[in-house]
Amino acid sequence: MGTLKLGTRVRVGGRMGMIVARTLDADSYYDVRFEDGSVTKYLRGHDLDPILADAAGGEGEDAER
C-alpha cells in the first residue's frame, strides 16, 4: 500500500475513522480520529483498512450523490 492522504476514511479493528496526521519516514505512521472523537496515534499503514474511494482520490462521496 502506498502513502495514504490526510482525510482518508479508514477502518481500524472494525471502527471507522479518518487519517488526521501522518509521519513519513522509512515506515509511515498515521494518527486516526474515530467517530467518537478519540484519536489513536502512530498506527502503521498495514493496521489500516482504507475506504478505497477516499484512498484513490477522494471522489467517492461526491460520486455517490
Image: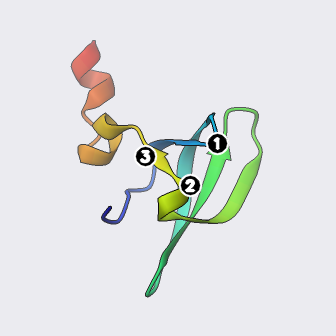
| The C terminus - image quarter | top left
Q: Position of residue 64 (x, y in %)?
A: 27, 16
Which residue, given by chain and number where applicable, does mark 1 sit on?
A: 13
How packed mark 2 is, by other alpha carbons closer than 10 Å (few <14, some 14-19, many 20 or more), is: some
Which residue, given by chain and number where applicable, does mark 2 sit on?
A: 20
Number of numbered callouts drawn: 3
Residue most toward the top?
65
Residue 14 relative to residue 52: left or right: right
Residue 35 relative to residue 57: left or right: right
Q: Residue at x 53, y 52 (%)?
A: 19
Can the viewer see residue 16 in this picture?
Answer: yes
Q: Nearer the viewer, residue 10 or 8?
A: 10
Q: Which mark is residue 33?
A: none
Q: Position of residue 43 (x, y in %)?
A: 61, 63
How packed mark 1 is, by other alpha carbons closer than 10 Å (few <14, some 14-19, many 20 or more), is: few
| The N terminus - image quarter | bottom left
Question: Label 1 sits on what residue type?
Answer: Gly
Question: Label 3 sits on what residue type?
Answer: Thr
Q: Position of residue 54 (x, y in %)?
A: 34, 40
Callout 1 secondary element: loop
Q: Residue at x 48, y 61 (%)?
A: 46
Image: 43 above or below 33 = below
Q: Going from the N terminus, do you reach mark 3 or mark 1 first?
A: 3
Residue 36 relative to residue 9: left or right: right
Q: Going from the N terminus, do you reach mark 3 or mark 2 first?
A: 3
Q: Which mark is residue 8?
A: 3
Question: Label 2 sits on what residue type?
Answer: Val
Can the viewer see residue 23 in this picture?
Answer: no
Image: 29 above or below 26 = above
